[in-house]
Image (cartoon, rainbow, N blue to C red):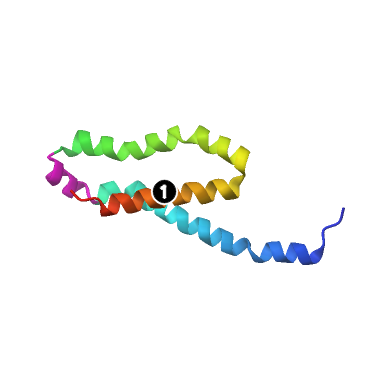
Amino acid sequence: MALEKSKVKKVLSYQWAVFGILAFAYFFVYFHRVSSAVVSADLQITFGVSAAASIAHLSSVYFYAYTVMQLPSVLLTENWGPRKTIRLLTLVAAAGAILTGIAST
């Protein structure tokens, strides 16, 4: 079964758009990963916590959630496919970031 050149060209024309969207999403993943270090002084003042224990634990919660979601992500990817899974989980992460941003203290 030979591939048609027009179909191959059409698929390859979208590769940089898909890469750009996923790279943009990864930028925000990394941003959320390190954001607690940036606001640690404000967190210490607001919540009266020490940097040694509470800020380190708060920063590690991101990695705990990441670890817990590995198995469901794999199962969703196997059942729905990567397109739907990435779309859904990116929207959930964006909604969570927006809700966190507009939350009042």
Q: Nearer the viewer, residue 68 or 52?
A: 68
Amino acid type, label 1: Ala
Q: Is the magenta stretch mostly helix, strand or loop?
A: helix
Per the image, the residue denoted by label 1 is: 93
Q: Start and end of the magenta stretch? A: 39-48
- Residue at the right extreme? 1
Q: In which quarter of the image is residue 27?
A: bottom left
Q: Splitting the image into 4 quarters, where does residue 51 fall?
A: top left
Residue drawn at x 44%, y 34% as measured from the top left: 67
**Residue at image coords 38%, 37%:** 63
x then y, percent, for residue 48:
12, 40
Q: Is residue 11 above or below residue 36?
A: below
Q: In this view, does 58 lie to the left or right of 8?
A: left
Q: What element carries label 1?
A: helix
- Was residue 83 drawn as part of the magenta stretch in this picture? no
Horizontal and vertical percent position of residue 62: 36, 40
Q: Is residue 45 magenta?
A: yes
Q: Residue at x 59, y 41 (%)?
A: 77
